[in-house]
Amino acid sequence: MSVQPQAVSEKTRRILQDLGLTDYEIKGYVSLLAHPGVQASEVSKDSDVPVSKIYEVLGNLERKGWVESQHSRPTRYFPKSPSTALQALRFRMEAELKSNEDHLLSELMPLYEMREIQERPDIWIIRGDYNIIAKVTESIDRCKRELLVVIPPALNSVIDLVVPALTNVKTAGVNVRILMSGEVNERSVSKIASLAELRFKDNMFGGGVIIDATEVILLLGRSSGNREALAIWSDHAGLASFAKNYFEFLWTEAQPKSKAAVP
């Protein structure tokens, strides 16, 4: 019994489309998962991809790394494992991004930084975990002198994502101080113990990042009934100064050691 493309969930189909596969390519790949080593005509019959399109579809799948062909007479096609195909896709995307990054930044960043002709608000709302992490990392990368960070319990899971940025600024000689909740595990502490001066304070519900006392990101977490994380970014001098003063107040009340032992 053949496995029809309808057996793939709608979510999987959307993900494959987001990864660059067309509907015909998805049908062809799913058909080959069920019947590897067949001819193009058999893939066409099983997947309902028109014969006039099947060679183009299989060629595209091979070029994109999802299928390989056995150059026999007639040619037979085999699916690559999803893990292999996704790993190859990741390498291609990273290589493409790296090759384009320098060009785009050299041309677009000067336009963004033309603040004398740019009008923008002093405050931005940032929504979504990945957008927030990207903004935090971008801001940390700009830090030249002093970085102050407050990590409440709900945000301990993001430590891994900001360690590379913390490492860079620490290497550059930036003074880094981090406040964490007393309810923190040893693994979390060990990751940043060598990158910052640490203190610990219980009952911290909010979080934030203060860059050179001129830029601040307030991490608001998730409101009741809202699954989307929120943060506020601002380079308003008054807000950044207030955030720094509040950090210093918390710092004086915090302890240099936590319930979690630092290795």
Image (cartoon, helix red, strand yellow):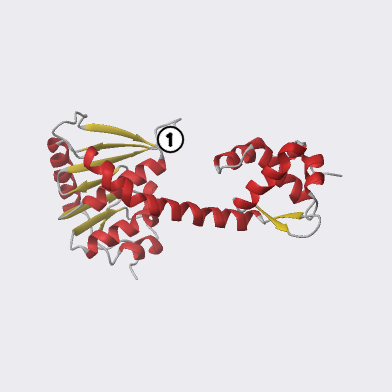
Q: Pointer 1: what residue?
A: 228
- Seen from the viewer's position, the closer of residues 65 and 59 is 59
Side of 214 relative to 262 (left or right): left
Side of 230 relative to 94 (left or right): left
Residue at 37% from the left image edge and 48% from the top image edge? 155
Whether residue 49 is visible here, answered yes or no, is no
Residue at 35% from the left image edge and 42% from the top image edge? 132
**Which residue reaches farthest right?**
1
Whether residue 80 is visible here, answered yes or no, is yes
Is 238 drawn above or below residue 65 in the view shown? above
Give the percent coordinates (x, y) of residue 84. 61, 58
Q: Picture quarter containing residue 6?
A: top right
Residue type pointed to by label 1 = Glu
Give the percent coordinates (x, y) of residue 31. 76, 45
Side of 60 relative to 210 (left or right): right
Residue at 67% from the left image edge and 43% from the top image edge? 56
Which quadrant is home to the C terminus? bottom left
**Which residue reaches farthest bottom?**
263
Q: Secondary structure at mark 1?
A: loop
Residue at 18% from the left image edge and 37% from the top image edge? 114
Is 105 drawn above or below residue 114 in the view shown? below
Give the percent coordinates (x, y) of residue 193. 29, 65
Binning the other alpha carbons within 10 Å of mark 1 as few (below 14), some (14 to 19) or many (20 upward) gives: few
Give the percent coordinates (x, y) of residue 247. 19, 47
